[in-house]
Amino acid sequence: MRIDKFLWSIRFYKTRTISTEEIKKNRVSIGESVVKSSKEVKEGDVIKIRKNQIDYKIKVIQIPKSRLGAKLVPLYIKDVTDKEQYELLKMRKMSQDYYRNRGEGRPTKKDRRDMDDYVENDVAADFTYWDDFFGETGDDSESENEN
């Protein structure tokens, strides 16, 4: 089976076109050599795939006849990816900002609620702060006029 069809059939890529494009970008190799889409996959091959900034390694156990259901994939491949690669992926996901960058479109409903809560709480705090800071403003201005 061709490698592009194999990667699609084991559900590593969503479409065969995406699989072919990734192979053209030299992100897929068998052993140490970069392959073309037409490369035939054999049982026992170790395929190295660069996806999401980590290097996956899978060992071919059997060649499927067609696209598999997700539960059947472990019967055809074995994941031999280093645990360090998965730890890198986990760290990258944790370090990414959950929210969008400032200035990128309208606020989400959650952002809007957070802003409203902040403004409501902040306004109440501001009035008490200003009253304490300036004291009784009416009495001070009258006493200055009397002098």
Image: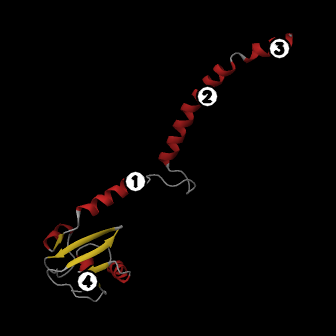
Instruction: Compare marks 4 and 3 and give the one earlier in the sequence.
Output: 4
Instruction: Compare marks 1 and 2 and give the one earlier in the sequence.
Output: 1
Circle number at residue 126:
2
Cβ–Cβ below 8 Å for labels 1 and 4? no
Instruction: Compare marks 2 and 3 and give the one earlier in the sequence.
Output: 2
Q: Is residue 103 left or right of residue 4?
A: right
Circle number at residue 3:
4
Measured from the top left, where is residue 2 in percent x and y?
A: 24, 86
What residue sits 30% from the left and 79% below the top? Answer: 28
Instruction: Compare marks 4 and 2 and give the one earlier in the sequence.
Output: 4
Give the amino acid at mark 4: Ile
Q: Is residue 33 above or below residue 10?
A: below
Give the amino acid at mark 3: Glu
C-alpha span from label 1 to label 2:
34 Å
Which residue in the protein does label 1 denote? Answer: 95
C-alpha span from label 2 to label 3:
26 Å
Measured from the top left, where is residue 130 in percent x and y?
A: 65, 24
Task: Locate the N terminus and report the quarter of the image it occupies.
Answer: bottom left
Q: Is residue 56 left or right of residue 113?
A: left
Toward which corner of the image does residue 138 lie, by quadrant? Answer: top right
Give the amino acid at mark 1: Ser
Element at label 3: helix
The local crowd at label 1, few if under 14, some if 14 to 19, many if 20 or more residues have their Cα within 10 Å, is: few
Which residue in the protein does label 3 denote? Answer: 144
Task: Give the image's coloring scheme.
Answer: secondary structure
What residue sits 27% from the left and 70% below the top? Answer: 56
Task: Locate the C terminus and report the quarter of the image it occupies.
Answer: top right
C-alpha span from label 4 to label 2:
65 Å
